[in-house]
Image (spheres, coloured by chain):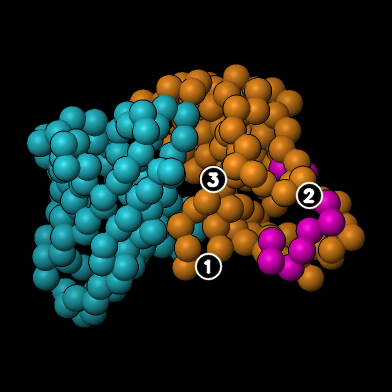
Amino acid sequence: EDKVVQSPLSLVVHEGDTVTLNCSYEVTNFRSLLWYKQEKKAPTFLFMLTSSGIEKKSGRLSSILDKKELFSILNITATQTGDSAVYLCAPNTGNQFYFGTGTSLTVIP
Amino acid sequence: DTEVTQTPKHLVMGMTNKKSLKCEQHMGHRAMYWYKQKAKKPPELMFVYSYEKLSINESVPSRFSPECPNSSLLNLHLHALQPEDSALYLCASSDRDGVSTGELFFGEGSRLTVL
């Protein structure tokens, strides 16, 4: 059975801190891994990772995939209150995207 | 146009009602999805349509009935729902049939309350 686990489940940090969110997966027919940010409504896309070891970067956010050890990390540097959200990872198995448990991040001013 | 449009945004229904949720995209995507999301939980896959054919049904109760009239539209027909079916229903689409290598584009969701 496919399994996607994120850690930690929740995290509270102060503005300016750096955080690392983890996603481990065991799925069949892995094709890519996606990261999403969800505030009050629908998830918004952050990154898609297909190759091991290649860091994707967007501003203060970056992410990397390890296909051998079956995990991905999402880093956020110099956190801001606007980063408060649930962060979801979703491995793509070709025609299905199964979401992990999510990490709830709260950034305190 | 990179939008997935869902209607209605909010729906309140009784357990004996029949209603439908609608989803539309004009990105030429051939895979469309219904997810259910309860509070403080991740989205849970319900159905996947590829080229207007149902390809995945994640053991969803028959009181939820999906329909894909054409490549741009996806409906979810609701009948005899239970209060525990109250949730945010998210529609999404992706670029390729069955072997999507792209992202999921989400609609804003339809928040359903069953009384």
| Left/right of residue A55 with respect to residue B109 in the rendered view | left
Alpha carbon distance from label 2 to label 3: 16 Å
Count of numbered tags: 3
Image colour assigned to chain B:
orange
Of the image marks 1 and 3, the number of the one nearer the N terminus: 1
Disc 1, disc 3: CB below 8 Å?
A: no
Quarter of the figure with the N terminus of chain A: top left
Frontmost of labels 1 and 3 is: 3
- Specify whether residue B49 is painted magenta: no
Q: Residue furthest front?
A: A1
Within-10-Å neighbours for mark 2: few <14, some 14–19, many 20+: some
Residue positioned 39% across, 59% down in the render: A101
Of the image marks 1 and 2, the number of the one nearer the N terminus: 1
Q: Is residue B92 above or below residue A16?
A: above
Residue positioned 49% across, 53% down in the render: B43
Q: Chain of mark 3?
A: B
Image colour assigned to chain A:
cyan
Q: Amino acid at mark 3?
A: Leu
Within-10-Å neighbours for mark 3: few <14, some 14–19, many 20+: many
Residue holding disc 2 = B63
Residue positioned 79% across, 58% down in the render: B81
Alpha carbon distance from label 1 to label 3: 15 Å
Residue holding disc 1 = B39
Query: Callout 1: helix, strand or loop?
Result: loop
* First to last magenta residue range: B76-85
Residue holding disc 3 = B45
